[in-house]
Amino acid sequence: MKLGAKAPILFAITQPETPRKLIVQSFSYEAMEWAGYEILRRLAQFANDAETVNVACVIRDEESAMMKRLEHDFDGAEEASHKSKSSTKMGSHLQRHLREIYALENRSAILLMRAKTMGKDLQFSGVCQLHFEQALVHARLLKEQMESSGRKRRRFADNVLAVGGWTRNLFLDCTLTILLRLPYLFMLMNS
């Protein structure tokens, strides 16, 4: 758990902070929290624990509201991130963002394949495969966009982004493992 707790710090070190990055990271954490509470609600419902269902629903809805508030301010975060940049630097700013999204799409594809191989349900595996293929298409489109604008992918920058994504996903793996085990702990305590 100590390593899982330090992973966000490692991720933050590899990523220079900007309002845009901070709002994207905050939004992604809110989405993961929303998903965690939705899973908790479903498992509590399966365990016939009405009180946990109610708590999970309240917090899940608050997480959803927070995601909407953050999304509403994406323009403000982006403006704050580049308002001091000269027009000549905007191209490199855009390229950096393209590389970041490209790294995220590739990491998403890896996670989807891991989920597909772990899943025993055919429908779940099919959904993972569909989203995996979509992530590959998105990554290809981003790569083409980066190359068409005359800039090649920077391997070092891509590797730094990949390490940042790896440390973040290590933290997420630890956190999700704990979240997924919580309902079982509740069931054991109630039996």
Image (spheres, rainbow, N blue to C red):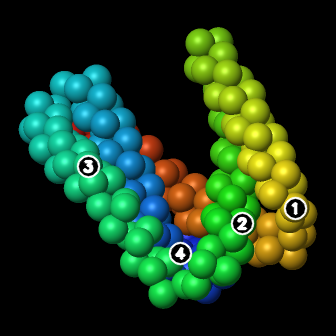
Q: Position of residue 84 (x, y in %)?
A: 48, 87
Please give the residue where the numbered disc 3 appears in the rendered image.
68
The structure residue drawn at horizontal position 17% and vertical position 38%, both measured from the top left corner, is: 57
Q: Quadrant of the C terminus?
A: top left
The numbered disc on residue 59 is none
Asked if disc 4 and disc 2 are in contact, CB closer than 8 Å, the reply is no
Image depth: mark 4 or mark 2 in front:
2
Image depth: mark 4 or mark 1 in front:
1
Q: CA distance from mark 4 to mark 2?
A: 24 Å
Q: Is residue 99 left or right of residue 178?
A: right
Q: Mark 3 or mark 2: name the one nearer the start of the chain.
A: 3
Q: Position of residue 187 (x, y in %)?
A: 29, 37
Q: Position of residue 136 (x, y in %)?
A: 77, 36
Q: Residues within 10 Å of mark 3 (few under 14, many from 20)?
A: few
The numbered disc on residue 8 is 4
Please give the residue where the numbered disc 1 appears in the rendered image.
150
Amino acid under disc 4: Pro
Residues 181 and 116: in front is: 116
Q: Quadrant of residue 162?
A: bottom right
Q: CA distance from mark 3 to mark 2?
A: 27 Å
Q: Secondary structure at mark 1?
A: loop
Is residue 106 in view from this perspective? Answer: no
Q: Mark 1 or mark 3: name the one nearer the start of the chain.
A: 3
The correct choice, above or below, for 24 with respect to 115 in the image is below
Q: Is residue 123 left or right of residue 25?
A: right
